[in-house]
Each structure stands twice: as C-alpha cells, then as structure tokens.
Amino acid sequence: MISQGIFRLFAVRTLLHVTVRETISEILGCRGVVLLALSLFISGTLSCGIAASMSALIAARAIAGMGGDGWVPQPHVIRCWP
C-alpha cells in the first residue's frame, strides 16, 4: 500500500518537474536550464555539508534533488544542446 503511494508521488512529481523544466527552457534557453540545474545541485550539496539539523539536511537534499533531476536527459534539452 505504501509503495503504491510512493510510486504515485514520484510519477506526479516527475510529470510536474518535466513540465516546469520545459517551460523554463523556453524562457532561459536550454543552456540556462542546465546551468540552473547545476547551480541548484551544487548549492544543495554544499548546504547538505553544512546542515546543522535534520530538517535543514532534508531541505538541502530536496534542493539538491531538484538540481540533480535537471541532469536527467530530456529530449528538449538534448535537442537544443550543440
């Protein structure tokens, strides 16, 4: 039962994230999306290293996860990259 809920949450999050990333790529361009993902990942990872509490670590992991998910190859990013 819990695994089905986790799978549904992951599927909805992925759907929303891909849609938002595609919209941002129309505004910033494909390189801007990759640089934004890299910035989020690095800042989240550095925040994980200096987190003083568990809640700060969870928030930093969420930020690093959003940036890391931006590295997942998507057709629109691959299409735009030279």
Image: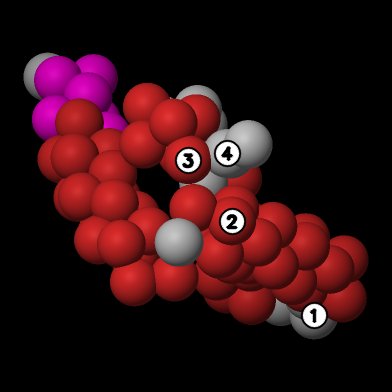
Q: Amino acid at mark 2?
A: Arg
Q: Picture quarter containing residue 40?
A: bottom right
Is 1 magenta? The answer is no
Gap between marks 1 and 3 measured at Cα: 40 Å
Residue 29 position, x and y percent, is 45, 61
Badge 1 or badge 2: first in the primary sequence: 2
Measure the C-alpha gap from mark 1 to mark 2. 33 Å
Query: If you read the primary sequence from the N terminus, does the residue marked by circle 4 or circle 2 appear first?
Result: 2
**Disc 4 packing (10 Å; few <14; some 14–19; many ≥20):** few
Q: Where 57 sits versus 69, above or below?
A: below
Question: What type of secondary structure mainly makes up the magenta span?
Answer: helix
Q: Secondary structure at mark 3?
A: helix
According to the image, label 3 marks what residue? 80
Q: Dot 4 corresponds to which residue?
A: 81
Q: Judge from the rendering whether residue 44 lies leftward or rightward of residue 7; answer left or right.
A: right
Cα–Cα span, label 3 and label 4? 4 Å
* Front in this rendered view, residue 42 or 76: 76
Disc 2 from disc 3: Cα separation: 8 Å
Sequence-wise first label, 2 or 3: 2
